[in-house]
Amino acid sequence: MQDELTIVIPAKNEVTMLPRLLASLCRQDCEGMRRTRVLVADAGSTDGTVEVALTFRDRLAVEVIPGGLPSVGRNAGARMATTRYVLFLDADVELTEPTLLRRALWTMRRRELHLATTNIACRHGGFFDDMLYAGNNFMQYVGSFLKPFATGMFMLFEREVFWKLGGFNERALFAEDYLLSKGVATSRFRIVKGKVLTTNRRFRKLGHGRMVWMFFQTMLHSWDDEYFLRDRGYWGEAEV
């Protein structure tokens, strides 16, 4: 698998969450997981994120590279990839199902897909957190018929197609993952059965109401890429 897949993780001050993700990658049952390249694109962390990432080098082929905003870090990692597929993961997710990555790659190969994602669930979330992620999963399902929608929490791309689409828009100040995924043909997009776990920290920082409003605006402006290039206060207020 090390000749087929590169994993890219943008990160900034993720000393608590990143080890959960890396440990969950260690538990994946893919052949060659130990030798699969894992690129952590660090955006100037000051909390020990780099150091904790490198402690996994005895279990994963971890490298730390310069990053920035998520789109910048993801593109930087993709530029270093030579494999057929690139998997983009957020630093605060966890792959709790050890078969998920193997099944996702099998689906990509069998269906000759350009992009695959999976469902999102909240770790230790409340009712409203669960409802928002359920809404996200529903929109992904709808998008599989109309216009693909996937988040940077889990995006498994065919690398050549990723670059044909232009990679992540580094000028976009939010929803850069949506801007990219909607360019994929619906026939080449699938949602892999299963889920990854994430946190509710974005909801805690911005509030459930504002997150719903931003999601609604994203859908409303799906044809207006310029909308996503203007600052909506997402990253400055969502950082923890």
Image (cartoon, rainbow, N blue to C red):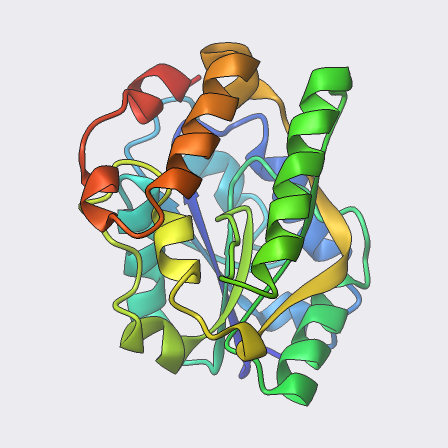
User: At 34% from the left edge and 47% from the top edge, which residue is drawn?
Assistant: 176
Q: Quadrant of the rendered structure where residue 5 is?
A: bottom right
Q: Position of residue 71 (x, y in %)?
A: 31, 48
Camera-nearest residue between 56 and 235: 235
Q: Position of residue 10 (x, y in %)?
A: 40, 45
Camera-nearest residue between 131 and 87: 131
The C terminus sits in image quarter: top left
Relative placement, left or right, of 184 versus 95 is left
201 up-or-down from 188: above or below: above
Relative placement, left or right, of 123 versus 74 is right
User: At 78% from the left edge and 46% from the top edge, which residue is drawn?
Assistant: 96
User: At 51% from the left edge and 55% from the top edge, which residue is drawn?
Assistant: 149
60 up-or-down from 12: above or below: below
95 up-or-down from 32: above or below: above
Examine the rendering and report whether any part of residue 214 can be seen.
yes
Examine the rendering and report whether any part of residue 126 can be seen.
no
Q: Position of residue 211 (x, y in %)?
A: 49, 22
User: At 68% from the left edge and 46% from the top edge, which residue is drawn?
Assistant: 138
The N terminus sits in image quarter: bottom right
Q: Quadrant of the rendered structure where residue 29 is?
A: bottom right
Q: Position of residue 102 (x, y in %)?
A: 74, 71
Marks counted in the figure total 0
